[in-house]
């Protein structure tokens, strides 16, 4: 891109952003160029009729609309977008991008609109068209041509012909030359719905037109045609927001019982430096007890506990496999619980290899990373810095309880190693905490949904856990 084109582009975007004229100095700062060079290019644009110089000091420059020669209205003034729900909220950025695309010199930018079914992509394209006329970028009588590529998806040749036109004799039944939608939309906007349904040949022709503004009708060999058209299109995508109970490892998209996409999440967030207030999850697991060979009569343990955080207790997920568990006195920053853990029926071991061994909770907390979390387990207070929870897992033994148990039962008070106390103590485990960027993920994936299909998602977590989405049945012609 030439320097003068960069200056013109910056003039349009800055004017759209600020809603007023722009000085050469402001553009020079934005472009990191010498003011004299920017001023020279701006004056050339004025001579060529592509910009207008204001009166007074400092000298301000204004972009000109190409369709009618009038000054383009600034994007910050009242526009057709203002009445859209979200224009001052979630849609602020998309609307700014849409305005910039329409005002981009010399004729605007081709645009791809992505979003779930029913969110208003077609309406958004129409608003861009109305904004183009409102600002003078498009003529008042500029056409808006809408076409759904899915209507001709089963006939690729006819689909390509609808968009680019057909030369006489291109195929059986083509008895005369036919204008395509690109020619009919000359000077305006061509809106292509489901554009991904275009066959490979049609996509190549579309890319050539976007790149060079030239095209040929289907079956045409010699003549090259031109058309000044803004193409706005939308595509079908699978978009899913995922939240795990642990760090996500990967997500698989399964179509008709076949994995069609595998999207990794591991190694995308681990090196991120966490600062300030963060959200994180960690699992508290309760259940290990005395050696079953020595204390065969002890089959259960009743735990009492409390969690306290200076921050906010966002959510609590219960990981219970037995009845009689309790979660009480839940507030914004604390909760209390009573949990009973049992030896497994499969092996008689505490927390042994059984399908149901887990008793505990997954806590989600929002707090400054420099803060801490306090746990009170059976009357004993434990304080853990958040950075330590994020660093790794830990198993905490209740050693004093083991000493008392061995003393009361066998009058056993000392040993040259710590084994007796460790193996006969009740224990709880705090699993490594995961920050929000680890357990939340939004994925988008293009998916051909022509015909009848069954689509599911499978989410793998780093701790080995697996979750499935409910099956989605699609029958689309």
Image: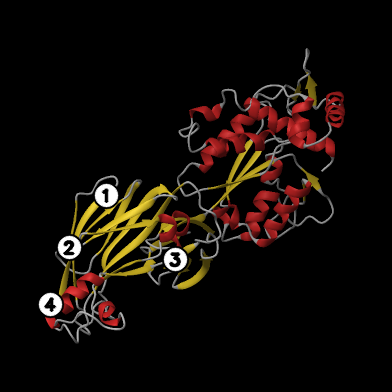
Number of residues whose C-alpha sits closer than 10 Å to that of mark 3, classed few (under 14), some (14–19) or many (20 or more): some
Number of residues whose C-alpha sits closer than 10 Å to that of mark 2, classed few (under 14), some (14–19) or many (20 or more): some
- At mark 3, the secondary structure is strand
Residue drawn at x 55%, y 27% as measured from the top left: 80
Q: Nearer the viewer, residue 177 or 183?
A: 183
Q: Which residue is mark 4?
A: 408
User: Which tag, 2 or 1, sits closer to the chain's start?
Assistant: 2
Residue drawn at x 21%, y 54% as measured from the top left: 336
Image quarter of residue 399 = bottom left
Q: Nearer the viewer, residue 439 or 365?
A: 365
In the displayed orientation, state which residue is furthest to the top. 56
Residue 448 image point, x, y percent: 53, 61
Q: Is residue 25 above or below residue 158?
A: above
Q: Is residue 15 above or below residue 90?
A: above
Q: Which residue is mark 1?
A: 334
Mark-to-mark CA distance, 1 and 3: 46 Å
Residue 266 image point, x, y percent: 51, 65
Mark-to-mark CA distance, 2 and 3: 42 Å
User: Which tag, 4 or 1, sits closer to the chain's start?
Assistant: 1
Quadrant housing the N terminus: top right
Between disc 2 and disc 1, the foreground one is 1
Mark-to-mark CA distance, 4 and 1: 35 Å
- At mark 1, the secondary structure is strand
User: Which tag, 3 or 4, sits closer to the chain's start?
Assistant: 4
* Residue 229 can be seen in this image: yes
In the displayed orientation, state which residue is furthest to the bottom. 293
User: Which tag, 2 or 4, sits closer to the chain's start?
Assistant: 2
Between disc 2 and disc 3, the foreground one is 2
Mark-to-mark CA distance, 2 and 1: 17 Å
Q: Which residue is mark 3?
A: 453
């Amino acid at each position: 891109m030439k320097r003068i084109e960069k200056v013109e582009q910056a003039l349009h975007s800055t004017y759209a952003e600020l809603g007023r004229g722009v000085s050469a100095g402001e553009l020079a700062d934005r472009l990191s160029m010498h003011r004299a060079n920017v001023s020279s290019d701006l004056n050339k644009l004025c001579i060529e009729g592509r910009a207008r110089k204001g009166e007074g000091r400092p000298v301000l420059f204004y972009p000109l609309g190409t369709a009618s020669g009038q000054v383009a209205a600034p994007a910050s003034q009242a526009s057709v977008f203002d009445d859209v729900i979200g224009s001052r909220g979630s849609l602020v950025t998309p609307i700014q991008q849409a305005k910039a695309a329409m005002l981009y010199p010399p004729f605007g930018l081709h645009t791809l609109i992505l979003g779930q079914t029913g969110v208003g992509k077609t309406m958004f394209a129409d608003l861009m068209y109305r904004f183009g006329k409102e600002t003078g970028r498009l003529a008042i009588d500029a056409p808006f041509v809408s076409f759904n590529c899915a209507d001709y998806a089963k006939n690729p040749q006819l689909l390509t012909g609808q968009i680019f036109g057909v030369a006489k004799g291109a195929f059986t039944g083509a008895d005369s030359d036919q204008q395509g939608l690109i020619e009919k939309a000359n000077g305006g906007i061509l809106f292509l719905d489901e554009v991904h349904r275009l066959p490979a040949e049609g996509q190549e022709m579309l890319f050539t037109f976007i790149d060079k503004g030239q095209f040929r009708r289907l079956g045409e060999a010699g003549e090259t045609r031109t058309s000044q058209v803004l193409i706005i299109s939308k595509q079908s995508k699978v978009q899913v927001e995922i939240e795990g109970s642990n760090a996500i490892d990967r997500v698989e998209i399964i179509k008709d019982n076949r994995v069609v996409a595998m999207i990794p999440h591991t190694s995308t967030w681990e090196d991120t430096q966490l600062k300030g207030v963060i959200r994180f999850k960690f699992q508290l697991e309760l259940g290990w007890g005395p050696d079953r060979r020595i204390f065969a009569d002890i089959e259960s343990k009743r735990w009492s506990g409390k969690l306290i955080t200076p921050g906010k207790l966002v959510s609590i997920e219960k990981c219970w496999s037995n009845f009689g568990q309790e979660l009480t006195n839940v507030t914004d920053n604390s909760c209390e619980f009573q949990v009973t853990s049992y030896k497994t029926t499969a092996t008689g071991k505490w927390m042994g290899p059984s399908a149901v061994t887990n008793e505990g909770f997954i806590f989600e907390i929002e707090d400054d990373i420099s803060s801490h979390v306090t746990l009170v387990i059976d009357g004993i207070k434990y304080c853990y810095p958040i950075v330590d929870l994020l660093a790794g897992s830990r198993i905490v033994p209740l050693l004093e309880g083991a000493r008392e148990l061995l003393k009361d039962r066998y009058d056993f008070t000392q040993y040259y190693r710590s084994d007796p106390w460790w193996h006969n103590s009740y224990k709880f485990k705090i699993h490594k905490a995961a920050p929000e960027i680890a357990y939340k993920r939004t994925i988008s994936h293009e998916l051909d949904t022509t015909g009848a299909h069954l689509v599911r998602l499978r989410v793998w977590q780093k701790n080995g856990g697996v979750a499935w989405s409910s099956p989605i049945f699609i029958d689309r012609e």
